[in-house]
Amino acid sequence: MHKQIVNFYMHVLKRNYVDIEVVDVFFVTAVTSKRNPEKYLPPGWIQRNRLVMIPVLLRDHWSLVVLDVQNSTIRSLDSRAGKSRAPLFVWRYLLSTSWSKKKWKIEKFENIPQQNNGHDCGVFMLQFARSEANQRLPDFSQGDVSRIRKIMVHEILSGSLFEEP
């Protein structure tokens, strides 16, 4: 899935859930390359929000890192049960900021939907973000992806979310 589509959909989520913040898809790349990641962070990105959603693209695979600000938790949601290093990149970045005073813990979700191919990770990641915003566990499967894609196209074109897919 293209980075700009992910950014757009994440901002559609933000418009529907005022207590979340979304971070640009280029943030983690900037963190890993040490190239001014702050320019990808919105003002007040942690202070005013319940959750901060960070879409991550590493080695052609999308995953999601969620900062649960209230519980000082960094959650990793990955549709390929691999060992994503994305939460560590985010944690290291937080240690370099004023937010280092908080004791952040990393939490990896194990029992979440998993993709069984090499091309649906973007859909999975965006649905994980939607579930997090709704404060629900992800409840879909690989068999739902075709239908979810169609719904997401309409949501992107309309700029607003429909009922839960």
Image: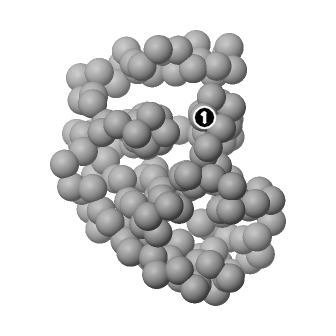
Q: Position of residue 154 (x, y in %)?
A: 58, 13
Q: Position of residue 75 (x, y in %)?
A: 39, 60
Residue ID at (53%, 80%)? 102
Q: Please state if 1 lies on the left or on the right of 75 as rendered.
A: right
Residue 153 can be seen, yes or no: no
Mark 1 crowdedness (10 Å alpha carbons): few <14, some 14-19, many ≥20: some
- Say what amino acid the circle numbered 1 marks: Tyr
Residue nearest the viewer, comparing 38 with 31: 38
Where is residue 3, by image quadrant?
Answer: top right
| Mark 1 residue element | loop
Count of marks placed on residues: 1
If the image is split into quadrants, where does the C terminus sit? top left
Q: Position of residue 67 (x, y in %)?
A: 50, 61
Q: Position of residue 24 (x, y in %)?
A: 68, 53
Residue nearest the viewer, comparing 17 with 28: 17
Residue ID at (65%, 38%)? 18
Residue 156 can be seen, yes or no: yes
Label 1 belongs to which residue? 17
Q: What is the image's colouring?
A: one colour
Outermost residue, front side: 70
Q: Please state if 27 lies on the left or on the right of 136 as rendered.
A: right
Where is residue 138, by image quadrant?
Answer: top left
Compared to residue 48, the image places residue 122 above or below, namely above
Residue ID at (56%, 52%)? 50
Where is residue 98, by image quadrant?
Answer: bottom right
Residue ID at (34%, 24%)? 145
